[in-house]
Image (cartoon, helix red, strand yellow):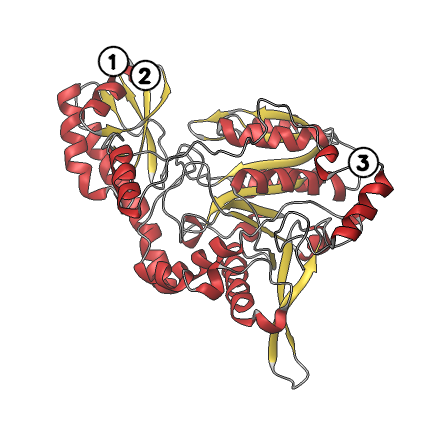
Amino acid sequence: MSGTDGTPYAPHTDDETAAMLSAVGVDDEEALFDIPDDVAFDGEFGIESRTEREVRTECSRIFGRNDELTEFLGRGHYGHYVPSVVDHLSDRAEFLTSYTQYQPEISQGFLQALFEYQSMLVELTGLPVANCSMYDAATALGEAATLADRVRSTSGEVVLVPEHLREGKRAVLANYCDGADLTIESYPMVDGNADVDAIADRVGDDVVMVYAENPTVRGCLEERLGAVGDLAANADALFVLGSDVVSLAVLEEPASVGADVVVGEAGVLGLPTAYGMGLGIFACSDEFLRQVPGRLVGASEDADGDRAYTLTLQTREQHIRKERATSNICTNQAWVALRAAMHAAALGPDGLVDLANDCVREAAALADRIDGLQGVVAPVHDRHHVREFVVRVDQPAAAIAAELETAGFAVHVVGEHRLQVCVTDLNAGRTDDLVAAFEEVI
């Protein structure tokens, strides 16, 4: 039955609508809204109608204005080749049109795929609990901070983070901490790694969480994570470790260094490079099972004794009493988690390890070639690196980056005389050209 506006989306008769309007004391639906005239819809969208062919031509013209740059950019956003099977499978209607899997009896395939995604995170992190609905690494970090505030047994309000934390990630964390009355403080870095002595001097009863990254935002591998974990444990603070699913394939297992929570990016699998969109990791110990934000897919049995999957735990305020909810996070990240699981399955365990090892080898090889140029030092930090590294140049870094851009390459400027370069399987074929451009510019 249609509503008064003739649409099928408001199932009320005219009499029912009139009764409701009378009950609230207004004459029509428009009186329920206060919309300024300058933004109110006047009945015209002002968009010229076009045929499909005309729209495609116009889009091609607009896209043609983009600079044709080969990106050697990273700092938390990484692109890897996504097998075509991921697109073909994830674009099936039963996946693409699915929202939250509230009805498990008709969502078994999707729920199983998400269960496999969670299982992948458990295997990579060594932690027994992982969810499937975080927006990105930044929001996952924010959720870890509020979890720490809820579960820590003694008082405290300080969250310790590395001074090299990416600005955007810190800004998101600050939004979360502001609502929870937490304070963010930075600890110093030494040659690209955490200054463990400085952390030891600072950590105390007022610290609720210590956060470290491996690899760091500069691509360095942290070499004393166990010591950082011990310091956090001795202070009864949560040790939260940031990483990504490709790096975790070859790095030491977070659980083995005392990580209570692992956050980071899973969007490095299954998604093209998207600056601003991702898929967050959130894994933790059993102790915090009922404090995990979002939802968990679990395995059970149906009435016939066959294995069945369902949304086992949902701590979102939409599902449970507001005062018991841990978070309102988790729109349908399930589809991108599905893509990550498909990508991981397509690679297989050996393929995932090979990809991660390539990220280490290709970064080392490119740094060595750039280091051979006059007036350049690469990498700046005397560490092992994953994907990316910092380069010191004698000339102003911004000027070098601008000339590289003119030559068709994009790199990060991270200091007055420092650039950052990231190499993956997507741009590895252009490293010869990048080195040649570096040499010419310098």
Q: Which mark is residue 102?
A: none
Residue under pointer 1: 395
Question: Which tag, 3 or 1, sits closer to the chain's start?
Answer: 3
Left or right of 190? Residue 329 is right
Quadrant of residue 192 within the rendered picture: top left
Q: Mark 2 and 1 residues: CB-CB less than 8 Å, in contact?
A: yes
Report the front residue among 225 and 1.
Answer: 1
- Which residue is depicted at the point 61% across and 75% down? 308
Residue 300 vs 66, above or below: the answer is: below
SS for dot 1: loop
- For the N terminus, the quadrant is bottom right
Residue at mark 3 to residue at mark 1: CA–CA distance: 69 Å
Say few, some or many: other residues with alpha carbon within 10 Å of mark 3 (under 14 / 14 to 19 / 20 or more).
Answer: few
Amino acid type of the residue that numbered disc 3 sits on in the rendered structure: Val
Residue 364 image offset from top left, x and y in percent: 27, 39
Say few, some or many: other residues with alpha carbon within 10 Å of mark 1 (under 14 / 14 to 19 / 20 or more).
Answer: some
Residue 230 image offset from top left, x and y in percent: 62, 42
Residue under pointer 2: 417
Residue 68 vs 310, above or below: the answer is: above
